[in-house]
Image (tube, helix red, strand yellow):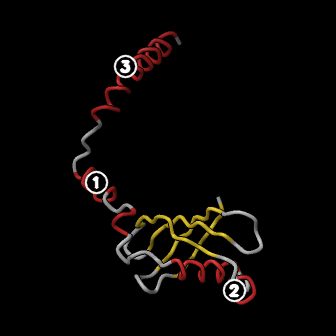
Amino acid sequence: MSGRSLLLGIGILIGIYAAPLVGRQGFDFGEGSKAASSLNGLMESDLDAGIRPSNETAKGELFRLSNWDISMHGIGSTVAVKRCISMGKDSIACELLAQLGWVDGEKLVEAVFEGKPGTWRMVAARAR
C-alpha cells in the first residue's frame, strides 16, 4: 500500500511542477494541432462577411422554432446576431441578443443553424 502512496505522491509533485510549463509552452500534437489551428481561425470575424444569418432571418427562425406568432408579437421584437462560429460544413452556432415585445429587457440566446448562407434554418436554441 505504501508503494502506491509513494507513486501517487510523486505523480502529484510532477503534475504540480509540469502544469505551469505545459501551460506556457503547450504540446505539439503533430497532425492534430493543424486541425485545431484551422478551427481557431473560424471565429466570428470569418463569419461576418455574409456567411452568418441576418438579424431578420434569426428573428424569423427563433419565432418559427418556438412556435410564437410573429404577426402578433414580431413587430415589437428584435433579434441581433452578435457572433457565430462554424461547427462543420453546414452548421454554425450563434449568439443572439433578443428583445421580445412581451418580455422586459434583452435575453441572450444560443442557437444552432444548419444550411448554407441565405438558407439558414435554426435547429436548436436555448436562453442563457
Q: Is residue 77 left or right of residue 119?
A: right
Q: Nearer the viewer, mark 1 or mark 3?
A: 1
Q: How many marks?
A: 3
x, y percentage for residue 95?
Answer: 53, 64
Q: Earlier in the sequence, mark 3 or mark 2?
A: 3
Q: Which mark is residue 37?
A: 1
- Residue 102: image quadrant is bottom right
Q: Earlier in the sequence, mark 1 or mark 3?
A: 3
Q: For mark 3, what is the residue? A: 17
Picture coordinates of residue 9, whole percent (x, y): 46, 14
Could you tell me which quadrant the C terminus lies in? Answer: bottom right
Q: Is residue 19 left or right of residue 63?
A: left
Mark 1 secondary-structure assignment: helix
Where is 113 relative to 6, above or below?
A: below
- Taking the spot 34% from the left edge, 74% from the top edge, the residue there is 49
Q: What's the residue type where badge 1 is placed?
A: Ser
Marks 1 and 3: CB-CB under 8 Å?
no
Q: CA distance from mark 2 to mark 1?
A: 41 Å
Instruction: Please determine whether, in this image, residue 106 is positioned above or below residue 30.
Output: below
